[in-house]
Amino acid sequence: MAPLLRTEAVSFDCPDAVRIAFLSDLHFRKNSGKRADRIVAVTVEAGPDLIMLGGDYVESAASLPILKSMATALTDRAPVFAVAGNHDYMIGIKQIRSALEAAGVRWVEKNTLELLLKNQTIAVHGNHTTLQCGDDQIPVLCAHNPRLFGRPGASDFPLGFAGHLHGCQAVFWESNGELYPGKWFYKWNGLRFDHQNGSFLVSRGLGDTLPLRFRCPYEVVMAKFGG
């Protein structure tokens, strides 16, 4: 089954419209080739200007060729930035980074990289909340764990993405974008968190270590702003 495309409009004033796709928690296995193809198809059809990958990519090193193939298909269509997830350090962060960079992905873990996009500079901050850009640039936070949204400096970002909803994929009801009963135990168990300066978007992910879900579809998140 193809993942859901979830589109979110974010209030941020800039001259030209920008579309950013966020893909997180892939958890590829050796037999995930068709799933990877469906993820690529949904993402490419949505026409993003920029793609961000939010970590937790594979369940074993044997799945790295699938990850590299997917990443290559994505970089053929738009610039791609990636951060690490907690799971990636267990699998082997050097191998994962190498596979992604070989496909043309820009590794932004604990770093800030800039991209000129439609005459605007996007400053992608990977898994950190220290603002590092000029006043004329658009800072975007690409995180794995949404707990980063609670760190000092996070509210300075007009747009932030995260995934990592492990253990909270059984959704019995939803209220104002918050997912229950997980919300009772996990502050960031929701889809969108608006703050004074912008919005944080949380992905329900594209895979799981234990594929046990209830009313929690796999999704590609697309943020649209400006224009």
Image (cartoon, rainbow, N blue to C red):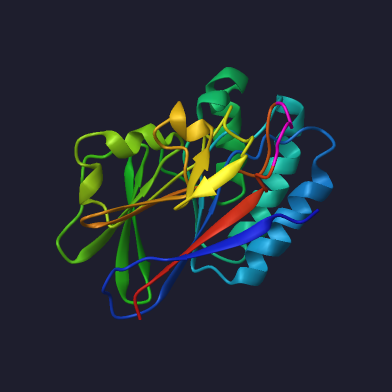
Q: Which residues are magenta?
A: 210-214
What residue sits 45% from the left and 26% below the top?
185
What residue sits 59% from the left and 58% below the top?
75
- Report x, y in % for residue 48: 53, 68
Predominant secondary structure in magenta?
loop
Image quadrant assignment for residue 45: bottom right
Image quadrant assignment for residue 133: bottom left
Q: Is residue 95 visible?
A: yes
Choose between 105 and 192: the one closer to the eye: 192
- Report x, y in % for residue 47: 58, 72
What residue sits 57% from the left and 32% below the top?
168
Q: Residue furthest left?
A: 135
Q: Is residue 137 left or right of residue 147?
A: left
* Residue 179, placed above or below residue 159: above
Question: Is residue 2 rendered magenta in the image?
Answer: no
Q: Residue furthest top?
A: 90
Choose between 101 and 209: the one closer to the eye: 209
- Report x, y in % for residue 180: 53, 38
